[in-house]
């Protein structure tokens, strides 16, 4: 007799949320190309832009700062391959950061970590004279996919920016599990992946903040404000947006019911689970904006969608 299996490998991929599945199925029935100006195209465009707003809200970004990608790996590669003079990186980063960094022509400066795998503040300070006056990038993951250790991104980003560095954070393991705000973190670039927070596989986002810039990820079209050419994967983006909205509102967050690796595990550092798990639960519960604000945004989205139905 076979016994039912319990899936625990949430850091590899999280189960698809019901909201994401429903949004994807509905989007598959929308025939238009999001770049087309006719009614069908506008309906598809409304789906993409609704999702963009939800992903932006999840991390405290502006919708215009969200670039949809195929996942965290693409976003990381785009940032690391942007022709930096120097890249500051620790050996505990994911391969989608380490490999493009090593393949770049940039000088690599390895950041030391302590016995818990946390990047050392004094190591970053010691590296500053090496990058003075140069176009340099600090890349620092938010949460480690193997250990769950959290990095002090906001603190290290502040030091880096004071010395003129750009800052990138791979937040794939933290998005939708911990409360994130790109302004509070002080990063220029942040990468997300939908399937880590209950969305579909094969879609993600790169947040490019404010005045920060990158060469186009893909050239040959005007999509994503000319930052990534190619017709958008509307159904996958719809699923991503629905998962982001659900995570932002706290629906289905494990902290609301029982602990699991997807939330508490991402916040568990080596210094002891209890305090970090408590912080993760608190952060998962935190929501940005009141119900009235959510209702206002929903009304605006419905107006845009209705406009798309009027040919």
Image (spheres, grey):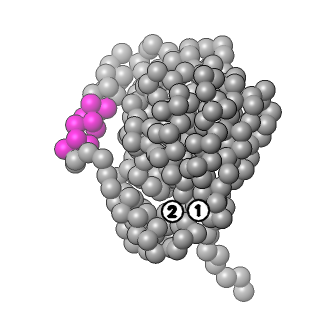
Which residue corresponds to mark 2? 267
Please tell me whether residue 53 belongs to the stretch shown in magenta: no
Residue at 64% over, 78% down? 4
Tell me the crowding category of disc 1: few under 14, some 14 to 19, or many 20 or more residues within 10 angstroms, Cα based: many
Tell me the crowding category of disc 2: few under 14, some 14 to 19, or many 20 or more residues within 10 angstroms, Cα based: many
Q: How many numbered discs, if any?
A: 2
Task: Point out the tag, 2 or 1, that comes first from the N-terminus.
Answer: 1
Residue at 38% over, 50% down? 248
State left or right for residue 291 relative to residue 135: left
Please tell me whether residue 293 belongs to the stretch shown in magenta: yes
Q: How far from the left and from the top, in percent, is residue 167?
A: 55, 35
- Mark 2 lies on a secondary structure that is helix
Q: Is residue 66 visible?
A: no
What kind of secondary structure does the magenta stretch mostly adopt? helix
Report the disc number at residue 302: none
Which residue corresponds to mark 1? 148
Q: How far from the left and from the top, in percent, is residue 177?
A: 47, 56
Report the quarter where the N terminus lies: bottom right
Residue at 45% over, 13% down? 37
C-alpha separation, residue under disc 2 versus residue under disc 1: 6 Å
Residue at 53% over, 27% down? 164
* Quadrant of residue 70 within the rendered picture: top right
* Quadrant of residue 221 within the rendered picture: top right
The residue nearer to you, when weighing 298 against 147, is: 147
Please provide the residue range marked out in magenta.
292-301
- Mark 1 lies on a secondary structure that is loop
Q: How far from the left and from the top, in percent, is residue 85?
A: 69, 25
Q: Are marks 2 and 1 in contact (CB under 8 Å)?
A: yes
Q: Is residue 133 visible?
A: yes
């Amino acid at each position: 007799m076979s016994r039912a299996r319990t899936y625990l490998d949430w850091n590899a991929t999280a189960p698809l949320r019901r909201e994401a599945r429903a949004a994807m199925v509905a989007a598959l029935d929308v025939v238009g190309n999001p770049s087309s100006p006719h009614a069908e195209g506008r309906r598809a465009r409304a789906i993409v832009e609704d999702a963009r707003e939800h992903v932006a809200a999840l991390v405290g970004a502006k919708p215009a700062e969200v670039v949809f990608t195929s996942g965290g790996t693409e976003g990381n590669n785009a940032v690391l391959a942007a022709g930096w003079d120097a890249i500051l990186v620790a050996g505990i980063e994911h391969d989608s950061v380490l490999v493009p960094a090593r393949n770049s022509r940039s000088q690599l400066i390895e950041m030391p970590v302590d016995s818990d795998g946390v990047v050392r503040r004094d190591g970053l300070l010691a590296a500053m004279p090496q990058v003075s006056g140069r176009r340099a990038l600090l890349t620092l993951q938010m949460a480690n996919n193997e250990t769950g250790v959290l990095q002090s991104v906001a603190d290290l980003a502040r030091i880096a920016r004071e010395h003129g560095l750009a800052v990138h954070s791979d937040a794939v393991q933290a998005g939708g599990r911990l409360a994130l705000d790109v302004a509070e973190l002080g990063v220029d670039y942040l990468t997300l992946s939908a399937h880590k927070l209950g969305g579909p596989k094969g879609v993600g986002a790169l947040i490019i903040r404010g005045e920060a810039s990158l060469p186009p990820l893909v050239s040959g079209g005007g999509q994503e404000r000319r930052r990534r050419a190619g017709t958008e994967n509307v159904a996958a983006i719809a699923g991503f947006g629905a998962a982001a909205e659900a995570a932002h509102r706290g629906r289905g967050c494990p902290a609301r019911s029982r602990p699991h690796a997807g939330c508490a595990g991402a916040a568990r550092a080596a210094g002891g689970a209890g305090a970090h798990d408590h912080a993760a639960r608190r952060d998962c519960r935190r929501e940005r904006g009141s119900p009235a604000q959510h209702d206002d945004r929903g009304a605006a989205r419905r107006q845009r969608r209705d406009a798309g139905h009027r040919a």
